[in-house]
Image: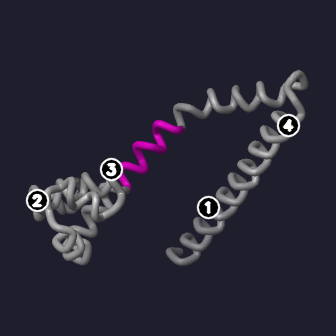
């Protein structure tokens, strides 16, 4: 599960609970799906090893999703480009323009924040 060997410290039931939390979301439903009581899951959610393993599993899931979404980028850009074509209805073009502008602003903000964090880290380390 992670480089720390957290998986070795978890029981099979705990690993099932983590998998269920990732797919079911709601703790009550995840506990039922994993074959454990809600109180057991609640107790595990306060154990550092379980919490660390759950965070690792969530991170892996998010990274996998990010890779999948990145593969859709060209197709999404083509769709937006087609929606901005003058032959489209004005409402379609306006919505596409809004999506493009909002996402460009978000991207700019993220790039700026990343640069600022990098500068702070360099100042702190150096």
Residue at the disc numbered 4: 91
Residue at the disc numbered 3: 23
Q: CA distance from mark 4 to mark 2?
A: 55 Å
Q: Badge 2 local density, few (<14 within 10 Å), some, or many (20+)?
A: few
Q: Earlier in the sequence, mark 2 or mark 3?
A: 2
Q: CA distance from mark 4 to mark 3?
A: 37 Å
Q: Earlier in the sequence, mark 1 or mark 3?
A: 3
Marks 4,2: beta carbons within 8 A:
no
Q: CA distance from mark 1 to mark 3?
A: 31 Å
Q: CA distance from mark 2 to mark 3?
A: 22 Å
Residue at the disc numbered 2: 8
What label does residue 114 carry, if any? 1
Q: Earlier in the sequence, mark 4 or mark 3?
A: 3
Marks 1,3: beta carbons within 8 A:
no
Which tag is nearer the camera, tag 4 or tag 2? Answer: 4
| Part of the protein shown in magenta | 59-69
- As drawn, 98 above or below 75: below
Identify which residue is drawn at 70% across, 26% down: 78
Which tag is nearer the camera, tag 1 or tag 2? Answer: 2
| Secondary structure of the residue carrying numbered label 4 | helix
Q: Quadrant of residue 115?
A: bottom right
């Amino acid at each position: 599960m992670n480089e720390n060997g957290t998986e070795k410290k978890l029981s099979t039931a705990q690993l099932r609970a983590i998998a269920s939390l990732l797919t079911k979301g709601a703790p009550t439903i995840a506990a039922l799906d994993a074959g454990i009581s809600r109180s057991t899951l609640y107790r595990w959610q306060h154990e550092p090893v379980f919490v660390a393993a759950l965070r690792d599993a969530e991170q892996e899931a998010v990274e996998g999703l990010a890779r999948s979404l990145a593969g859709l980028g060209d197709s999404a850009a083509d769709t937006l480009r087609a929606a901005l074509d003058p032959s489209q209805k004005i409402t379609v073009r306006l919505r596409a323009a809004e999506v493009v502008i909002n996402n460009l602003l978000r991207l700019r903000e993220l790039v700026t924040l990343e640069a600022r964090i990098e500068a702070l880290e360099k100042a702190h380390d150096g």
